[in-house]
């Protein structure tokens, strides 16, 4: 049975997720700049290990985003007026 998390738990999880997403976004930007610098011959490319580590972080953030969407779907309060019948309107 799934329990609905408390609002403060959701807020904390959202803050942690946002911080990780921001951090990964920064690393992606650095990766892209480094790729362009490598193409221009200015700096060596990122190591294979570094590239794999970034790919792992991106994957984990993607999985966290999917889990967040799944949780939101489970805990969302439906809009009862989306259906005309539930608002008293009938065709």
Image: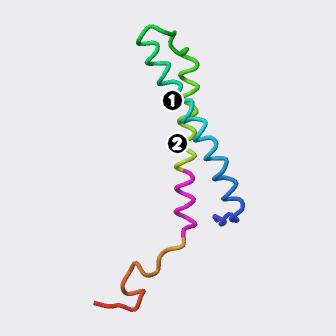
Residue 61 image position (x, y, % from top left): 56, 41
**Quadrant location of the C terminus in the rendered image:** bottom left
Task: Name the residue that disc number 1 marks.
Answer: 29
Q: Is residue 89 above or below residue 18?
A: below
Residue 5 falls in image quadrant: bottom right
**Magenta-colored stretch includes residue 69:** yes
Q: Where is residue 59 in the image (x, y as percent from the top left)?
A: 53, 36
Identify whether 87 is placed above or below 59.
below
Pointer 1 and pointer 2: residues touching (CB < 8 Å)?
no
- The residue positioned 66% from the left and 59% from the top of the image is 10
Q: Give the residues drawn in magenta, as a range.
A: 67-76
- Left or right: 37 as drawn, with respect to 13: left
* Element assignment for label 1: helix
Predominant secondary structure, magenta span: helix
- Which quadrant is home to the N terminus? bottom right
Q: How far apart are marks 1 and 2 (CA)?
A: 17 Å
Seen at 63% across and 53% down, the residue is 14
Q: Mark 2 points at which residue?
A: 62
């Amino acid at each position: 049975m799934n329990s609905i998390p408390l609002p403060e738990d959701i807020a904390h999880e959202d803050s942690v997720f946002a911080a990780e997403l921001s951090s990964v976004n920064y690393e992606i930007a650095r990766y892209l700049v480094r790729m362009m610098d490598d193409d221009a011959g200015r700096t060596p490319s990122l190591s294979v290990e570094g590239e794999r580590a970034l790919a792992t972080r991106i994957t984990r953030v993607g999985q966290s985003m999917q889990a967040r969407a799944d949780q939101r779907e489970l805990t969302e309060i439906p809009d009862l007026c989306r259906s005309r019948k539930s608002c008293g309107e009938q065709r």
